Image (cartoon, rainbow, N blue to C red):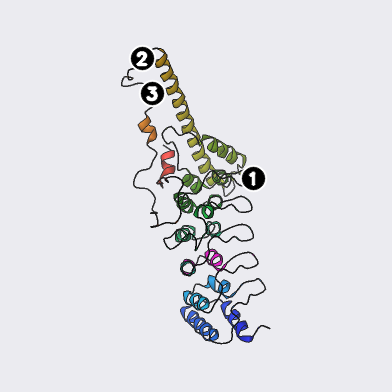
Amino acid sequence: MLNQNTKTLFSLLGEYVFTPEEKDKIFEQVQALLKQNIDIKYKDEHCQNALHLAAPKGDVRIIEALIAAGADLNSQDDQGQTPICIAIIAGQTEIVKKLIEKNARLDTKNIYGNNTLHIASTSGKDSEIINVLFGADVSIGTHIEDGQEYLNCQNKEGKTPLHIASEYNKGEAIRLLLWAGADSQLKSTSGEKALHLAAKNFSTGAIIALNRKFIKGEDISYIEDYKVALDTIKSYRPNSSSPNWNNYQSSLEILRSVVAQYQEQEKNKLKSMSLEVTFECSGHNEELPTGSALPDEKKIANDRESEAGSQYESPSRSPFPSNSECSRLQDDTLQQLQH
């Protein structure tokens, strides 16, 4: 039978506090109760323990006191959420840091197959919390089993954190995920890549952030992705009176510009190949004279990766191995595309 002290503890942790004085009073009462006969393993009707209730309240002192008393920081509620998931949803960055310090698991999945990165990608403090989840204090073996699996984890809909960030138009979160090595080519169970979800939702910021391999030298491998994205956004065209109309127009303009420039690059590449074959067949091995019609490869290779790039720097000693060197990203991509 649940004792009165435990009931009182859960009641206190369920209260909303608005002033520092109220917060101090709750903390003092919790401290006193933890010295009494408390069932620290108790869970309520939603399978939440004391840490679940304390996580969104923002008092690091209570979190520390509950963990010291033996509260399970990796306990899952009836939705599969651990206390750190609750803290992420509430945007409590300091609580997230403290739970990581105390070795909370980050790769535990909820009933929908989402891990902490999926959840952070929808948070109001998405980039701030994702930066913490990639921090130097996070280690493989303690907080996560496998870095790439954690980063590219697919939920029950086959969506990775990058998919979720693209749906929610989280440009800064996308930049961080791509920096860490997120795979932009993974498909959801419905066959959609992150770029296609961004187009479907008129997520202009996401489209710009995902555009990290735009016009790179002779790399035209992404043209089909952009063609699909362009067809997708056209099929979801809203009414001109819709609040999404401006986002639709901006996203459509970007995708049209990208496809046009990819096609121009593809045409130049084919033209170059044709000229090379012509010169070889004619027995001409000398270099082409200045002013030749061949494409200026150096100009094409200038892929907007100047050193003035993103505001985010790589967290030191990141535990997440990248499959390829990630590009620096420009915040002025949209302006460049419109020229």
Q: Sequence order check: which comes first, mark 2 or mark 3?
A: 2
Label 2: state its secondary structure. loop
Q: Is residue 131 left or right of residue 81?
A: left
Judged from this view, the residue extending furthest toward the left is 290
Marks 2 and 3: which is nearer the front? Answer: 2
Q: Is residue 339 left or right of residue 88?
A: left
Choose top left, top right, bottom left or bottom right for residue 14: bottom right
Q: Is residue 253 above or below residue 72?
A: above
From the viewer's side, name the closer residue of 320 and 93. Answer: 320
Residue for point 35% across, 17% down: 285
Distance between the alpha carbons at the discs numbered 1 and 3:
41 Å
Residue interval drawn in magenta:
73-96
Q: x, y (%) of residue 219? A: 45, 34
Residue drawn at x 59%, y 83% is: 38
Residue count near mark 3 (Cα–Cα under 10 Å), binned few <14, some 14–19, many ≥20: some
Between 335 and 305, the one lying in front of the other is: 305
| Residue receiving disc 1 | 190
Asked if residue 238 is among those painted magenta in the image, a careful observer would answer no
The residue labelled by disc 2 is: 284
* Residue type for callout 1: Ser
Q: Quadrant of the C terminus?
A: top left
Please identify the quadrant where the N terminus is shown.
bottom right
Q: Position of residue 236 (x, y in %)?
A: 61, 42
Camera-near label (2 vs 1) is: 2
Q: Which residue is mark 3?
A: 294
Q: Which amino acid is tagged 3?
A: Leu
Does dot 1 land on a helix, a strand or a loop?
A: loop
**What x and y, as percent, mark residue 42?**
62, 77
